[in-house]
């Protein structure tokens, strides 16, 4: 998308990319092939945003969609002008405009009295964010530059308190119409300067020199992160767990790039200090307290993992947008004799899965005193929510909750290995300490966000029977692998703890 002089246009998305980072704008415009493809769960989020955008059309009955594709911009502009001339049309969806070499498509352009128009931007978020203000401001800039009078600007976002009834979604109640007219007016004065600066970036013959840091993740994760960090050392200080942006910049100002180079005088937490020691020596760091931290955790023990979805468009009566709905659990058990067994549950999703999820879990764990090991606080919070949703099972769910023991803080406080690479996630820690654990062979689903997206597709009827069967098998394999990884991680921790205290591994 370039002019005859070879310089790219700005678009709304490029404008926002440039506001985040000029290097991201340049790469987006001229070197898109260097971007990392979005993960599948992020694509699902994009699709959810599209669904919300189309849902908002229901608030403007009689509106007409400009159907030309993004690469048909000139035709879309002509079509938009044709629709604007029809006084009987109350709204135009995806109207196309161009001014000052900025091309935009407007979610909703609502006809107002006396020839005026209302700008309506639709977001799948549950509130107004700073980036949304930049989004609508640049649109108003282009619209008014194109000769339209825009006395009203609104952001239509999801109402987090909306509860789905038995009769389907009440769209006026589902959306909040936030008036941004005043705040956008205050930003318009800055737009000419900002637009000029970004056009200058697009006129640069080479990539701007911008160093990667925390800005690469705010307001969005930059798709060029891997490209921009490819030559940095594996123990780059950015990966020091819990390092604040200010302290990262302080190290950068001292010319320190490697964790192993962080001086003793630089203030670090206990965990950060262990990480520095590991990268200095190349050997795992195991605290003397690891064996004590594992006391009472078995075996015998259970190993539990939940999967949950949080669809923006609520599916089951009584649920809210983005509410977590657990739909799957996996449960491994290691007996006193070392025998490993497994049980699992996966909802069909045709009805609210929570009652059957909770009942099957209570049945599987009924009455035993053995600890139930998890690897986050997620299962605990979901058990609390399940007890509220299924009060008849609250006693059994509470008993399960009382038996939960979290291995994540045990790992954080007591062990670090070079292969963790700054992460304490199960998918980094377990393979590092127990090489027999791998997630690389899980091609269909190997991440919780992908699992959630798969279930949303199943529940929404977006897959045929064959694909649904394949996704269900992949879901079962993925969740089972998580709890197996937890079993093997526990065994590895026990062995390291016993070795650290000079005893034999249990």
Image (tube, grey):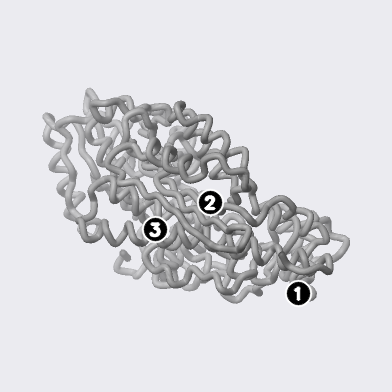
Rendered image quadrant of residue 191: top left
Q: Residue at x 46, y 62 (%)?
A: 223
Where residue 486 appears, x then y in whole percent?
Answer: 58, 59
Question: Which numbered tag is attached to residue 451?
Answer: none
Choose the circle earlier in sequence order: 3 or 1: 1
Q: Residue at x 34, y 30 (%)?
A: 175
At which x and y percent is residue 73? Answer: 23, 55
Q: Which mark is residue 476?
A: 3
19 or 338, which is in the foreground?
Answer: 338
Viewer-closest of 59 and 455: 455
Q: Look at the image and tell me whether residue 351 can be seen.
A: yes
Q: Helix or strand or loop: what does disc 3 sit on?
A: helix
Which disc number belongs to residue 283? 1
| Nearest the eye: 296 or 49 | 296
Residue on which the image places disc 2:
304
- Asked if disc 1 and disc 2 are in contact, CB closer than 8 Å, the reply is no
Front in this rendered view, residue 480 or 150: 480
What SS does tag 1 mark?
A: loop
């Amino acid at each position: 998308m370039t002019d005859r002089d070879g310089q790219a246009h700005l678009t709304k998305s490029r404008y926002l990319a440039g506001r985040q980072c000029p290097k991201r704008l340049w790469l987006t415009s001229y070197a898109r092939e260097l971007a990392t493809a979005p993960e599948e769960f992020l694509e699902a989020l994009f699709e959810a945003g599209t669904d919300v955008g189309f849902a908002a059309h229901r608030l403007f009955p009689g509106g007409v969609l400009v159907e030309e594709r993004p690469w048909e911009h000139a035709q879309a502009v002509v079509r938009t002008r044709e629709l604007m001339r029809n006084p009987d049309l109350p709204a135009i969806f995806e109207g196309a405009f161009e001014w000052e070499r900025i091309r935009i498509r407007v979610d909703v352009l609502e006809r107002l009295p006396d020839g005026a128009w209302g700008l309506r931007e639709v977001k799948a978020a549950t509130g107004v964010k700073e980036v949304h203000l930049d989004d609508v401001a640049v649109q108003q800039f282009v619209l008014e530059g194109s000769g339209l009078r825009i006395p009203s600007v609104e952001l239509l976002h999801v109402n987090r308190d909306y509860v789905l009834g038995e009769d389907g979604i009440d769209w006026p109640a589902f959306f909040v119409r936030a008036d941004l007219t005043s705040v956008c007016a205050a930003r318009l004065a800055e737009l000419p300067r900002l637009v000029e600066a970004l056009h200058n970036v697009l006129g640069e013959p080479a990539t701007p020199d911008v160093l990667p840091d925390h800005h690469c993740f705010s307001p969005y994760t930059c798709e060029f992160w891997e490209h921009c960090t490819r030559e940095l050392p594996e123990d780059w200080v950015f990966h020091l767990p819990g390092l604040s942006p200010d302290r990262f910049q302080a190290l950068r100002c001292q010319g320190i790039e490697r964790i192993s180079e962080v001086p003793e005088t630089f203030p670090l937490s206990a965990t950060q200090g262990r990480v520095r020691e590991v990268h200095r020596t190349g050997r795992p760091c195991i605290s003397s307290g690891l064996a004590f931290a594992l006391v009472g955790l078995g075996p015998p023990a259970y190993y539990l993992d939940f999967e949950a979805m949080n669809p923006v468009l609520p599916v089951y009566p009584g649920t809210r947008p983005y509410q977590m709905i657990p739909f799957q659990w996996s449960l491994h058990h290691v007996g006193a004799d070392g025998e490993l067994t497994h049980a699992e549950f996966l909802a069909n999703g045709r009805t609210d899965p929570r009652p059957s999820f909770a009942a099957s879990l209570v049945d599987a764990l009924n009455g035993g005193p053995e600890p139930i090991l998890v690897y986050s606080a997620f299962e605990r919070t979901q058990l609390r929510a399940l007890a509220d949703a299924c009060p008849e099972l609250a006693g059994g769910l509470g008993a399960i909750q009382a038996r939960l023991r979290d291995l994540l803080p045990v790992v954080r406080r007591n062990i670090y290995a070079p292969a963790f690479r700054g992460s304490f996630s199960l998918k980094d820690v377990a393979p590092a300490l127990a090489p027999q654990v791998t997630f690389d062979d899980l091609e269909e689903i190997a991440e919780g966000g992908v699992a959630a997206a798969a279930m949303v597709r199943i529940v929404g009827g977006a897959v045929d029977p064959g694909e649904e069967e394949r996704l269900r098998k992949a879901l079962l394999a993925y969740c089972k692998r998580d709890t197996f990884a937890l079993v093997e991680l526990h065994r590895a921790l026990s062995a390291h703890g016993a070795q650290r205290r000079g005893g034999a591994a249990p």
